[in-house]
Amino acid sequence: MIELKAENGYAVVVLTPFQYINVLEYLYQNNVDKKECILILISHLNKSVRQIQDIGFTNEFSSLHMPMIGNKNIWLRFLRTYLLLNKYLYLTPIVGNINNNWSAYLIQKSKSAITPIIVDDGAATLPLIKKRNLGDFTIPQPKSNSKIGLFQMFFLKTNNQIKKKLTFFTIFKSLKGKNYDNVEMNCLELLKNNYGLISSSLMDEIWFIGSPFVQLGMISYRDYEIVINKIVSYSHKMGIKLKYFNHRIEKGFLFEGAETVNNNTPFEIFYLNSKRKPKYIIGFYSTSLFALAAMNVPSSLISIYFDQNVRQKGDWKSIDLVYDAIENEDKIKLVNIKDLNNL
């Protein structure tokens, strides 16, 4: 393993496949050699780690670490992760989730002259930058309701705020950094160059991207089913096949008239790997819609908006920030639930 130098070295900490894709894009767009980076897969879930490794390139980094995988003793895994991060505090952090206690620790403990880089973690970037611009962003503190939470409370002591300058690398065009933050656009050039968009006629299919509204208690199953049934009716009317792509935490939803797809790869890669593309891709506030818009895909992109009267508990303010961003995205059509038949 090569010992990295502070002036050009990076400590990359990622939790999910989407974060990893965005890290690869940052390195590609900024001409950073992966040999100048150590890669830390911080997830304790074997499935997430495998999905990241399946994307590729992990063997091109200076070193690869999976400190939360393996030993059943949670204390040993925590200690291994804690010592690993402290070893690389002199490097520039690239993280995919600033709300993650490990990432926040690495950012705050890094040298004051360093500007950490934050890549998109789904749509979480939108409320994060808004709060940063208003000066009221605070880091969620560890909770004592689990063993790992207790360890983090005692060892990962961080301030509530991150006062140093940050660089946000994002696919969201409407974002502007105020004060001292930078915002750099992620154009997903690596994905486009690696997979390409095969020019062919579009299939008579709708691909619907599921969201975990029901699991999170944000709307009722009945209201969610009404939306899907309207899409089913539209697909039958037009003679178009409907495929429903389950979100990873959805519990195997099956809707009559739709083919359910349980996909374990990032949706963007699944789409690009498909030899033929669907006419329509429909979802709610999925980040995949923004990613596909950034790649200028040939399929029509549609976002479904829920009215206030069907909303239940949950952080709808943050979701409405995503819908606001969709309204500023000319490649995504925002449709109210009442107007589904007018697609």
Image (spheres, helix red, strand yellow):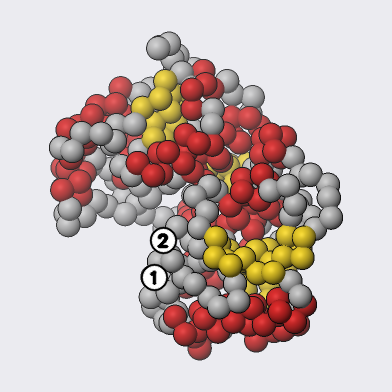
341, above or below 143, in the image? below
Residue in the foreground of this view, choosing between 269 and 28:
269
Total marks placed:
2
333, above or below 122, in the image? below
Q: Amino acid at mark 1?
A: Gln
Residue at 24% from the left image edge and 40% from the top image edge: 156
Callout 1: SS: loop
Residue at 66% from the left image edge and 50% from the top image edge: 271
Q: Earlier in the sequence, mark 1 or mark 2?
A: 1
Q: Is residue 273 left or right of residue 113?
A: right
Residue at 21% from the left image edge and 55% from the top image edge: 143
Residue in the foreground of this view, choosing between 166 and 339:
339
**Residue 162 image offset from top left, x and y in percent:** 39, 44
Callout 2: SS: loop
- The reply to whether callout 1 and callout 2 are in contact (CB within 8 Å) is yes
Q: Amino acid at mark 2?
A: Ile
Tell me the quarter of the image containing the N terminus. top left
How many residues crowd around disc 2 within 10 Å: few (fewer than 14), some, or many (20 or more)?
few
- The residue where tag 2 is placed is 249
Tell me the quarter of the image containing the C terminus. bottom right
* Mark number, residue 215: 1
**Residue 240 image offset from top left, x and y in percent:** 74, 71
Q: Is residue 78 left or right of residue 3?
A: left
Whether residue 68 can be seen here = yes
287, above or below 44, in the image? below
Q: Is residue 138 left or right of residue 79?
A: right
Residue at 45% from the left image edge and 57% from the top image edge: 248
**Residue 203 image offset from top left, x and y in percent:** 77, 60
Report how far apart the C-alphas of labels 1 and 2 lie in the structure.
8 Å
